[in-house]
Amino acid sequence: MLCVESAEAGKRLDHFLQDKLPQFSRSRLQSWIKSGRVLVNDAAEKTSYALHAADTVTVQPADLVPLKAEAEDIALDILYEDASVVAVNKPAGMVVHAGAGQHSGTLTNALVHRFGQLSALGGDERPGIVHRLDRYTSGVILVARTDAAHQHLAAQFSSRTIEKVYLALVHGSFATDRGHIDTPIVRDPVRRVRMTAKLGRGRTAITDYQVLRRFKDRALLEVKIGTGRTHQIRVHLASIGHPVVGDTLYGAPKSALGRYFLHAHRIAFTSPASGERVTVVSPLAAELEAELQRAL
């Protein structure tokens, strides 16, 4: 049983639970509220219910369904492959691995079908996954085929010897050609689906950008990141007044693009198998090329 403190009065029920039970996803907590597994003063309430001081909240969790990658025959665009690693061109809209409310159509499901055995260090739900891309970010992503390769690549990410380069079309104009952003990033305490760089605290995040091309009211940027925080590029660019085109979560106006314009264009790493430096390039998706033409 949880008791609402005076400082928490007015908070939504689902937000209160996410603060108190961070080990569960917001969607899972909301499903428990809707199914009557969460009671406020022994009565069922809506997810948006505004709590009062001294309210008591009782939670009866449902059994968690184990998440596991399941082989699915889904086409993959393989950009590079050796005995230790696979580089895949992920399309926008594809989720990397299973999560709350998403069990099919994932990249991991496609990888298990195509390759069978992959690194097990990420667990049953994330075989081979060393890093991730947001659902609507397209482009190159690395997958470890063995545990040893996974450890090797993870060490490269940790030491920042892997170079990740993105292309982003953003709103606004730039007075200079280059910029550096290093404000820390933390989850937004009000809108939990977002991250924020406005609180002056959080995890270290490093983003560098260069203007490649200027349009009337937009700019195409090459973006390099020294860290891999959740939504990092999107949050950092929005924080300086240049949200990514189509990224309504971070302040961009609605767009006909149907996604946001962020693409993992290039990645350079040392192959665990050969020890050689490898650079993999993913060309812009067709819909992004079309968006650039519309920006002219």
Image (spheres, helix red, strand yellow):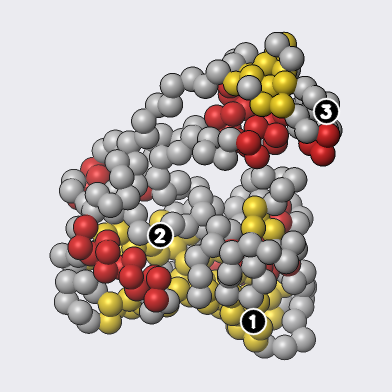
Q: Position of residue 237 (x, y in %)?
A: 68, 69
Specify the amino acid type for callout 2.
Answer: His
Which disc is residue 131 wearing? Answer: 2
Which residue lies at the image location 47% right of the left edge and 57% below the top edge?
A: 133
Classify residue 99 by image quadrant: top left
* Number of numbered labels in the structure image: 3
Classify residue 146 by image quadrant: bottom left
Residue 226 in sight from this viewpoint: yes
User: Could you say whether the residue bearing mark 1 is in a helix, strand or loop?
Assistant: strand
Q: Quadrant of the N terminus?
A: top right
Specify the amino acid type for callout 1.
Answer: His
Of residues 211 and 52, the one nearer the viewer is 52
Q: Nearer the viewer, mark 3 or mark 2?
A: 3
Residue 250 in the image: above or below residue 20: below
Which disc is residue 180 wearing? Answer: 1
Which disc is residue 273 wearing? Answer: none
Of residues 259 and 160, the one nearer the viewer is 160
Q: Quadrant of the C terminus?
A: bottom right
User: Could you say whether the residue bearing mark 2 is in a helix, strand or loop?
Assistant: loop
Which residue does the numbered mark 3 point to in the structure image? 53
User: Could you say whether the residue bearing mark 3 is in a helix, strand or loop?
Assistant: loop
